[in-house]
Amino acid sequence: MIHQALALPRLAHPFLTRGFGSNGGVFLHQSRTKHQGVAFSAADDDRIASSNSIQTRKVVEHVCLLKAKQSLLSEEKEKDMLDYLYTSQYQMRGIVAISVGSIGDKSSGDFTHALFVRFQRKEDLEMFYENPLFLKVLNEHVTPFCHVCPLTCKTPFLSLALSSRLLILLVLLYLDVSSLMLQGLTNVDYESEVEDDILSIFRKGEEYNYGEEFVLLVTFAKNASEKNIKDATDSFAQLTSSLPSLIVQSTQGSNFNKSSEEFTHAAVVRFRSFDAMEIFVEGREYKDMWRSQFEPFIEKSVALHFSVDPVGTDVM
C-alpha cells in the first residue's frame, strides 16, 4: 500500500532540494555523481529539437520501487542484490535494457531502490513476471531484505507461496490482502515510443553508460478530463524532447498494470548527469509546467532518482 506521505492531494512541483513543496509529497535525491559539468545551450537545443521528424518504435517499460529493511541489508548484500537484478537480463529473453540503483537520502522517503526494465513487447513483460530464473533472484536476493509480504501474485518481488495457515489468519483478522501485498512496493508498466535506432532502443553507447535516472509517477484525479491529461503529458514530452544537451532519453505512458494501480501515469528520464537533472528540475520552464499542467489535476505523485553506473557485467 502506498504510504500516506505519497497520497497527499495537490502536490507542488518536484523541486530538487525542496521536496514537492509545502503541500506534501516526496522527492528523494541521490548524491552527486562523478561526471563532467554540463554546458547548457538553449540555442543548441532548439536547433537539435527542430530537426526533421524521426522514425520511432514502441517499447514496453517496467518500473519497480521497493523499500529495503536497512537493518538487514548490509553493504555487501545490497551490492549482491543490485548485481543479481542487473545481470538477470543476460539470462532472460525479451529484456532490451535495464537499470537499477539505490535512491539517496533514504531517511526522507519510503523507497530505497528502483528498477527500470525495457521490453520489446507486452508478451515479454508477461514472461518476465513468471520467469523461474528471475523469481529465484527475487526470492533469494531481494525479498529477504525488503518490506514485501510473500504472496502469490503476478507482481514482481512477491514470492510464490502463501500458506493456508497464514491465509486463514489474514481472513480472521479481516486484513486486506491486496493492500498487504503492495506494502513497500510499487510497480508501474506502460507503453511508450523511442527512436527506431539500435542504440536508443537498447540504451547502449557511451552516453548511456552513466547519468541520472529520474522517475516520475503521478495519479490524475478522477475528475481530470482526457484533455487535461493529454495537455499535461504532451507538455512534459515536449519539454524533455527540447533539451538534448541535458537529456539522453525520455519515455512516458499510462499504467496498464492491473495489480498495481496506485499511479495512473509514469515517466522515466535519463539525464546526462546529476547536474543536468538539477538544471532541469530547478528551471523555470519545468516549474511553470508543473504548476499549470499537473498540479491542478493530480491527486498524488512521487519523484525520485538514482545514479546510473555499471553494476555488473558477469552473470551472477
Image (spheres, rainbow, N blue to C red):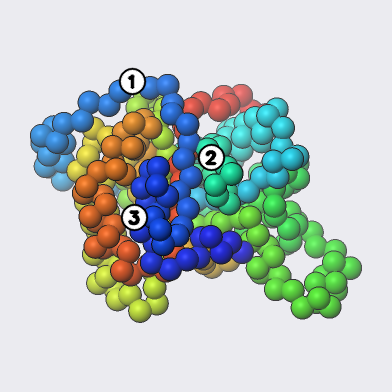
> In this rendering, is residue 310 above or below 66?
above
* Mark-to-mark CA distance, 3 and 1: 27 Å
Mark with earlier residue (1, 2)? 1
Q: Which is more N-terminal, label 1 or label 3?
A: 3
Which numbered disc covers residue 210?
none
| Residue 151 picture location, percent across and down | 74, 61
Q: Write down the residue under mark 3.
A: 13
Q: In front here: 237 or 28?
A: 28
Q: Quadrant of the rendered structure where residue 226 is?
A: bottom left
Whole-percent x, y for residue 84 in the image: 65, 34
Q: Which residue is mark 2?
A: 105
Q: Residue at x 79, y 59 (%)?
A: 161
Residue at the front extreme, as displayed: 22
Q: Is residue 24 above or below residue 73?
A: below
Question: Are the residues at dot 1 and dot 2 in contact (C-beta closer than 8 Å)?
Answer: no
As helix, strand or loop, the secondary structure at mark 3 comes to loop
* Distance (Cα) linking label 2 and label 3: 19 Å
**In terms of sequence position, does the residue under pointer 2 or pointer 3 come before the other?**
3
Closer to the eye: label 1 or 2: 2
Type of amino acid at the residue the image marks with label 3 = His
Q: Which residue is mark 1?
A: 36
Question: Marks 1 and 2, how far apart in space?
Answer: 23 Å
